[in-house]
Image (cartoon, rainbow, N blue to C red):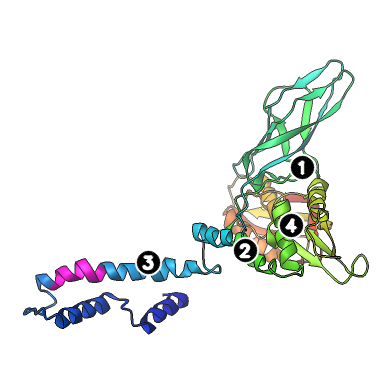
Amino acid sequence: MSDLKQQFIAELKNANLPVTVADFTAQFEQKLKESGFAVNNQSGFSPFWRLQTALVAEPAASLVESLVSKVMPNTFVLLADKNWLEQHGQSRNVERLASVKARGQLHFTRADAQTKLVIPTGTLIESLPINGQVYQLALDTPCTFEVGQLAAVATATASNAGHAYNLSAGYYVRIMDEYEGVHVTNQQSWLITAGQDVETDENYRQRIRDAFANQGSYHMDAVYRNIIATAGGIPSDNIIFEKGGPRGPGTANAYVYLSVGDISPAIINRINDHLSEGNHGLADDLKVFAIPKQPLTLTVTIKQKPNTASIAADVTEFVRSAFRENDAYPNVNRVTPMSDFSFSLLNAELHQQFNQLHSVTFNLNNIQTGFWLPTLNGLEVRHG
């Protein structure tokens, strides 16, 4: 039994309320005596007492169990979940953030520019499989190559909602229809709107707590975290503040990043525009920036158990997931600002994911980050 559940039971007992089958049975017996109802057979095995236990004591004890396990915990924002948590949020005018489909620009190139070419709206663009998952985008508008034009840009939207579709540059490379000599890719700042999942209970709970700060007249971290999360779909944990006048006296910066993929200037501009429209405190000077990044070159040397097929490609995608380039392996520990990224932990996670591995070594030691995220400038996975 959890400590919190014991506390709730203790509160009921302090109020002289029965909580167990034995408590309800004893209370029922007392009420019978007080009413003058005499029962000659007091054995616990008598049909009467078995019947009253089944009809009264056990259902009542079940109600108490439901009360201390569900109802009482869910009266607190700290412990509430799902629909209960949404009721807390609605009472503070904080709605759970809905899921959003990723939308962005894709770059097309072709080898032959002698004729006009139109790739129609709705054409599917896919990633290669990542841990068995293929991610699809559909063109919002036609991609048109005029005569003599070798490159074109078109906007596409993910087939489904979720941050997993915010793949880093170079993932969306396959056109489902046949167009000879035509290639497609997503570049680093391809996102116009970042995809997001339905807001988790943890993130929603944090924003509900932040709503208390909105009741005051001063804008604080909690207020701005809530504004940025709502305007840009940025998880609360992915927002960090730099104070102390980084751009001059009275200024502060907020750095944001996505759970998967690279945050684009379009998203940053949308958040800053929202702030400049009056969603800030009097005389506040806060600007939002994409988290700075520091590129590194990583070499991973793997040795596999005998008679196993190469898993170098899978290990590559697993490591890229750790560096927030895809979400195909959600259980991997990901790089974050202001933290220590452990390659020994990544090593253990690789062994847990791939039982074909015998050993894994990295050319880098642990990474101690500041107001920045490490990115992969180069990644090589090779057999030792």
Between discs 1 and 2, the one toward the N terminus:
1
Q: Secondary structure at mark 1?
A: strand
Q: Residue at x 69, y 36 (%)?
A: 157
Between discs 3 and 4, the one toward the N terminus:
3
Range shown magenta: 49-58
Quadrant of residue 31 within the rendered picture: bottom left
Residue 37 in view in this figure? yes
x and y percentages locating residue 159 in the rendered image? 63, 36
Residue that carries the numbered disc 4 in the rendered image: 228
Between discs 4 and 1, the one toward the N terminus:
1
Residue 336 in view in this figure? no
Residue that carries the numbered disc 2 in the rendered image: 208
Between discs 2 and 4, the one toward the N terminus:
2
Residue that carries the numbered disc 1 in the rendered image: 192
The circle on residue 66 is: 3
x and y percentages locating residue 218 in the rendered image? 76, 70
Q: Amino acid at mark 1?
A: Ile
Taking depth in this image into account, of 64 and 148 the one nearest to the observer is: 64
Q: Residue at x 75, y 67 (%)?
A: 221
